[in-house]
Image (spheres, grey):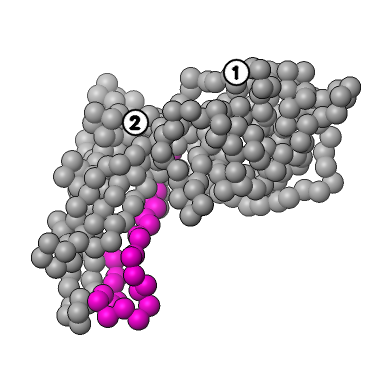
Amino acid sequence: MIKLNASRLAACVFFMLTLSGLGRGETGEIIVSSNITQTTVQASSYLPVTILGNAIPALINVPVSKISALSFRNNALAIIPFQIDKRDPKGRYDLSNKDNTQNLLLDKRDECVFMAADAGDRIERLAKYFAQQPAVEIGIVDPQTGNRKWVYLVASPPDQKPAHIAQRYVSYDADKDSIETAIYRIGFSGAHPFLIDNLQWHTSLPEKWTRNVADTMKIRHVGKLLGQPFVRTQADYRSRLVAVKEGPVRIIRRTLNTVRILGFLQSPSASIDHIAFANGFQMDTTVDFPFPLAGSSLISKPTPR
């Protein structure tokens, strides 16, 4: 993960309640459960908080298009930027961009994502609009100060369209293949789209952006092929952009890549996901080998650098 300059605070995220739905005639008041599940995450004003579906069972099998995130600030309950990134049975992000998301249901593997900076005060009652719907109260604790804030994940009634917010922390320019936030802008190589070849910082100057401070990304693979040592660089790669998911909190951009092994022989494909959020981004790499590596005599001691 490439870390940008930003303060990072450890926070304890705890799930104080999961409701499968309030009974008929009840008021909709949120009562804190005695069973508190605790987990620790890294959080700051700009870092996203990621909640797995299995941590919020009240919302499992709810259509993802019906789930919203709410925060109570300045004595008002408001929608905050929020997204759900689905994962397939292998644990990879599902970037199929299906047109009909109404029937996509929240699964235990999926990730619910919002910004810690958007958390607000605790509320005793959800609006009557949500009283009969599944709801989850998420508390965020700063262990250094003891300050607490809350975010509420709620499902909209079946006959109502979920509310949305126009605010975004990150945007994608398909024509330039670039990602932009209020802090940085990154661009990718046209010849090798898994490589970042542009990095600029946002400034308050009239020109808005600094010059490109990225030199280049270099890839080195060292190993043995049929017993002979080999070295491969980024020039030996074939790469293509295959999918982009644009959300208000983060963008997931995927390339498929192979590297030349011998002559025209290419390696198994490797998918690289660039995950960009307000003040940072990371690269997740997955390689599919059509043969077991253990005991293989074709390639040995492969080492990426």
**Outermost right residue:** 25
Q: Quadrant of residue 175?
A: top left
Give the spatial CA distance, label 2 vs label 1.
26 Å
Question: Dots 2 and 1: beta carbons under 8 Å?
Answer: no
Q: Amino acid at mark 2?
A: Tyr
Q: Which mark is residue 161?
A: 1
Q: Which mark is residue 172?
A: 2
Q: Does the magenta-highlighted stretch encompass residue 210? A: no
In front: label 2 or label 1: 1
Give 122 or 145, whichever is nearer the viewer: 122
Q: What residue is rendered at 30% in x and 42% in y?
A: 242
Give 273 or 78, whichever is nearer the viewer: 273
Q: What residue is rendered at 17% in x and 73% in y?
A: 230
Quarter of the rendering occupied by the C terminus: bottom left
Crowding near the residue tagged with mark 2, few <14, some 14–19, many ≥20 C-alpha atoms within 10 Å? many
Judging from the image, what secondary structure is the residue with disc 2 in? strand
Q: What residue is rendered at 33% in x and 52% in y?
A: 271
Q: Quadrant of residue 205?
A: top left
Find the magenta span and give its range: 276-305
Q: Is residue 55 above or below residue 248?
A: below
